[in-house]
């Protein structure tokens, strides 16, 4: 199937009470759209990254009681997983879609990556558009700030020094943004976002060499 956009029902999935019921909605409404998005962006991402990228769709398998507040797909260079690698995310909370380059706390060597980012702080400021967002916690929808408002040096220092520190950079699209209802426009925005953050991704890979 081709991706035709997100609908109000997709966002309303996160208002459904109960783990089983909400997961059923996510599996029926959202996960097929993740597959469709992957078909349209994965090959472009691989060309940008210069290596094979593997799709991972969040299954929320460890949950036994509380339903997820968000859901996502991720691309990483590793076929078996993504959390321990720099990766690219597309996902939904109840009020917005996020498109991230993500470095989360499970990532080995994040101290070296953060230090490298801090060394190139001026370059990062130049590369990141003012409309982009930065998050310090991938699990919280309110942990994001505009790149124009956030202290990037402080964020990266925390990412380096705090065990649970994270760094995510990319874009938010409000659930009422008309772009989300237009599949081709959203795909275009995703590709543009990945292209914009790709130099940051490539820089981080140099940390472990």
Image (cartoon, helix red, strand yellow):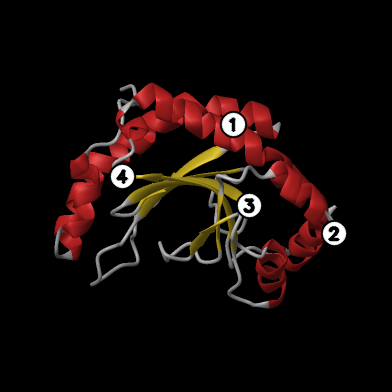
Q: Earlier in the sequence, mark 4 or mark 1?
A: 1
Quadrant of res 134: bottom right
Marks 4/2: CA distance? 36 Å
Q: Residue at x 63, y 63 (%)?
A: 107
- Residue 57 in view: no
**Neighbourhood count class around disc 2 (C-alpha, 10 Å): few under 14, some 14–19, many 20 upward:** few
Disc 4 vs disc 1: Cβ atoms closer than 8 Å?
no
Q: Is residue 30 above or below residue 179?
A: below
Q: Is residue 47 above or below residue 155?
A: above
Marks 2/1: CA distance? 26 Å
Q: Nearer the viewer, mark 3 or mark 4?
A: 4
Q: In the rendering, at what x and y percent does residue 191 appear? A: 54, 30
Q: In the rendering, at what x and y percent does residue 197 appear? A: 65, 41
Q: Which mark is residue 86?
A: 3
Q: Earlier in the sequence, mark 2 or mark 3?
A: 3
In the figure, is residue 52 to the left or right of 1? right
Would you name the residue on which mark 1 appears?
45
Q: Is residue 149 above or below residue 9?
A: below
Say what secondary structure mark 4 lies in.
Answer: loop
Q: Residue at x 51, y 66 (%)?
A: 137
Q: Which mark is residue 175?
A: 4
Would you name the residue on which mark 2 appears?
119
- State which quarter of the image contains the N terminus: top left
Quadrant of res 79: top right
């Amino acid at each position: 199937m081709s991706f035709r956009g997100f609908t109000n029902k997709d966002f309303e999935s996160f208002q459904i009470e109960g783990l089983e019921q909400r997961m059923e909605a996510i599996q029926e409404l959202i996960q097929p759209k993740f597959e469709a998005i992957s078909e349209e962006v994965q090959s472009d991402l691989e060309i940008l990254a210069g290596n094979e990228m593997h799709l991972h769709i969040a299954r929320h398998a460890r949950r036994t009681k509380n339903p997820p507040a968000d859901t996502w797909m991720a691309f990483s260079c590793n076929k078996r997983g993504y959390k321990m690698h720099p990766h690219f995310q597309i996902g939904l909370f109840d009020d917005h879609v996020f498109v991230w380059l993500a470095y989360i706390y499970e990532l080995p060597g994040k101290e070296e990556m953060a230090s490298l980012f801090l060394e190139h702080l001026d370059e990062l400021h130049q590369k990141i558009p003012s409309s982009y967002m930065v998050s310090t916690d991938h699990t919280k929808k309110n942990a994001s700030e505009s790149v124009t408002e956030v202290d990037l040096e402080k964020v990266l220092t925390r990412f380096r020094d705090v065990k649970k520190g994270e760094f995510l950079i990319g874009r938010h699209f409000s659930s009422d943004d008309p772009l989300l209802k237009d599949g081709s426009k959203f795909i275009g925005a995703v590709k543009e976002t990945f292209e914009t953050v790709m130099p940051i991704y490539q820089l981080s890979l140099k940390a472990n060499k």
